[in-house]
Every structure is written in structure tokens, then in C-alpha cells.
Amino acid sequence: MLTWVGVAFFGAIGAVTRYRVDSAVSARLPSDFPIGTLIVNLTGSLALGVLVGAAVPDRVAFLLGTGFMGGYTTFSTWMVESVRLGEIGEVALLLRNLWLSLLAGFGVAAAGFYVGQAIT
Amino acid sequence: MSTGTLRARGSSGETDRRLSRASARALSRLSAEQARITVIVAGGAIGTLARAGLAQGVPHRAGHWPWATFIANLAGAFILGWLLTRLAERTSPSRHWRAFAGTGFCGALTTFSAFQVETFQFAHDGDAVLAVAYPLVSILAGMALAVLGVLISRWGRHW
């Protein structure tokens, strides 16, 4: 029971952190390209990679990985922002948003994993 | 549809209306930013519980398709496509819906970090088929469902 309260708590904090980071990045770098979501998703993938690489205990993985990082990063916004770029005719930006997030996300998740392995 | 056109029928509708009036009053005492944070916390907690429940109910086994993340991500892409179009193109029932259901619930229901780490683990374990198929199918289906949500929102007149 307490674990579920904890995961909801960390997920909620993650969601608010995403809102804050996205707002701050978008305010500093105004652009049609959804850079705020990209920064959120890359930093979250790096951090989750470290947690998994470090093979943290199950409960920590559940609270910080499933809870915080899951609440922090978002797949739905990535998809809907890409659709929106297509709707306004920015097909090049749409494709860049897809491949950049995909490849860079994979790269930072891998880097995080090896860093996590190295520090434990 | 504005809240004014909603006619509560029966006692549960009346209770709902009283609850939503009470929560609207509580939120109106906060600044706009405090109210937004409050509803993001609420939506984020619910979205995380739904995803965590799926993850526990359909545990991911190494070398298998990550169904929990996949389902949560596709459901969230569909709901968010529907929701943002609904709120942008027709009257919003409340100014807090976007932050609550969009930024909070859908944002927390879906996850990019688990999606990427799962993909990396397939590659790390030498499972080339899943390492390519999982991200590809997730993106294609996610885009398709987000578009479907947008279209359904435009077609529908009563939802």
C-alpha cells in the first residue's frame, strides 16, 4: 500500500518537474521545434539508464524509475507534438523530432546504463 | 460543451456537480500557477498509478515485448490527441482540464524513458529484431493513434 502511495507521489513530482523544465526551456529557446519535451525525455532516459545500469534494489527502481522518471518523461506529448508539426506543414521538423528523440534517447539511455554499471 | 449546458440527472450527477463546484472554488483561491501545479500533481499521480498498475499486472520479462509500456504509451497518445484538439477547437469545460488531463494524466501515464531503456536492453542482449521492431511499431502506432484521437475529436459532436 505504502509503495503505491510512494509511486504516485514520485510520479506527481515527476510530472510537475516536467512542466517546470518544459516551461523554462521553451521560454528560453522559443521555436516551432518542441525542444522542451526533447530535453525532458533525454535527461529522463539518461537518469533511468543509470538506475537500471546500477541495478538498484527493486523498491528504489519502482519509486524512482517507474514513479519519478515515468511521470517525468512523456511519450504522448512527443507523439502529439509531432502530429501538430505535420498539421502546420513542418514535415522536416516532424521527422527531425522523431529521429532525433529516438536516436539521442537510445544513446543517452545506453550511456546512462554503462555509467550506472561503472559506478557500482 | 460548456458546463452550463451539462444537465445533471439523478443524484450522482448532482453529487458530481457539487464536487466539481467545490473543487473549482478551492482552486479559485489559488493563483493561476498554483492551481495549475495542483491539478498537474493530481493528474500525474493518477497517470503514474495507472502505468505502475499495468507494469505490475503485466510484468516485463527480458526478451519479450514490453506490453505494459506499449499499451500505456499508445493509450496516452490517443487520449492526448483527442483531448488537446477537443480543448483547442471547442469550448473547454474548465481551464484546468489541459493541465490536469494533458500535462498531468497523459504525461505521467506515458513514458519515454522506459521505452528507451527497454529498447536499449533488447540491443544489449543481442535481440536485434525486438531492438528495431519495438521502437518502430511504438512510433508508427503512436502517431496513428494520436492522429485518430485528433480526427475523432473533430468528428464527434457529443463527446
Image (tube, rainbow, N blue to C red):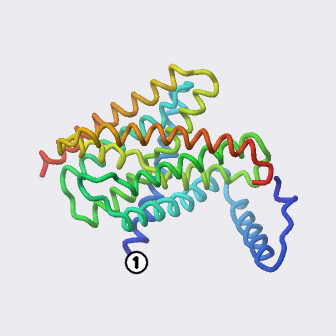
Q: Quadrant of the C terminus of chain B?
A: bottom right
Residue A110, horizontal then vertical, whole percent: 24, 39
Rendered position, A101 above or below B113:
above
As drawn, the residue found furthest toward the front would be B129
Which residue position holds label 1? A1
Question: Does A58 sit left or right of A12 as displayed?
Answer: left
**Residue at 33%, 31% in the rendered image:** A103
Question: Does A28 sit left or right of B60 as displayed?
Answer: right
**Residue at 28%, 34% in the rendered image:** A107
**Residue at 51%, 19% in the rendered image:** A92
Q: Nearer the viewer, residue B27 or A4?
A: A4
**Residue at 42%, 63% in the rendered image:** B54
Rendered position, A60 above or below A29:
below
Question: Does A34 sit left or right of B129 as displayed?
Answer: right
For the residue labelled by badge 1, is the local secondary structure a helix, a strand or a loop?
loop
Q: Nearer the viewer, residue B153 or A55?
A: B153
Residue B16, horizontal then vertical, whole percent: 74, 72
Residue A74, horizontal then vertical, whole percent: 46, 46
- Image quadrant of residue A4? bottom left
Residue type for callout 1: Met
Marker count (numbered): 1
**Chain for disc number 1:** A
Q: For mark 1, does the 10 Å Cα neighbourhood hold few (<14), some (14 to 19), or many (20 or more) residues?
A: few
Question: Does A67 sit left or right of B6 as displayed?
Answer: left
As drawn, the residue found furthest toward the bottom would be B11
Residue B96, horizontal then vertical, whole percent: 68, 53
